Image (tube, grey):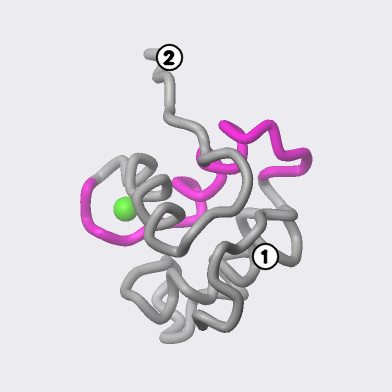
Amino acid sequence: MAFKRYRGLPQGEVTVEEFRAWLSQFDADHNGRISREELQSALRSLNVWFSWWKARDGVRAADANRDGAVGGDDEVGRLFAFAQQHLHVKIAQLGYY
Ligand SMILES: [Ca+2]
């Protein structure tokens, strides 16, 4: 299996645009949506513990239309909110969502 080096999240506060750009590099099949497996590799790249569970919970929290993946502005915004609460990602724009 090839080892891929990912860009990290910016230090300090993160805007939703930065979060989206960061997340897009994990869209392995380039379908514009982040599956649970893709989110898990994103979390793993941040050295998040229990990435399997957190990826499952993150998709569950963000997947408004219940298609099993995170896609579109609304769902990325929800995932961003999840990341703030559960991964301690700081937001740069309070009240943006
Ligand atoms: Ca995808």
Q: Secondary structure at mark 2?
A: loop
Residue 48 in the image: x percent, y percent? 71, 39
Question: Going 39% across and 76% down the picture, which residue do you hit?
Answer: 67
11, above or below 18, in the image: above
50, above or below 3, in the image: below
**Residue at image mark 2:** 3
Question: Going 43% across and 20% down the picture, which residue do you hit?
Answer: 5
- Asked whether residue 59 is drawn in magenta, I would say no
- Give the total number of marks visible in the rendering: 2
Question: Going 57% across and 31% down the picture, which residue do you hit?
Answer: 45
Give me the disc on residue 57. 1
The front one of 12 and 23 is 12
Question: Going 43% across and 27% down the picture, which residue do you hit?
Answer: 6
The front one of 12 and 85 is 12
Q: Who comes first in sequence, dot 2 or dot 1?
A: 2
Mark 2: few/some/many CA within 10 Å (<14, 14-19, 20+): few
Give me the disc on residue 8. none
38, above or below 90, in the image: above
Question: In the rendered view, does 23 fall on the left or right side of 43?
Answer: left
Residue 72 in the image: x percent, y percent? 31, 74
Dots 2, 1 in contact, CB < 8 A: no
Q: Amino acid at mark 2?
A: Phe
Question: In the rendered view, does 55 fall on the left or right side of 88?
Answer: left
Question: In the rendered view, does 7 fall on the left or right side of 90?
Answer: left
Magenta segment: 30-51
Residue 1 in the image: x percent, y percent? 41, 14
- Asked whether residue 48 is drawn in magenta, I would say yes
Q: Quarter-wise, where is residue 46 in the image?
A: top right
Q: Secondary structure at mark 1?
A: helix
Residue 71 in the image: x percent, y percent? 35, 69
Q: Amino acid at mark 1?
A: Asp
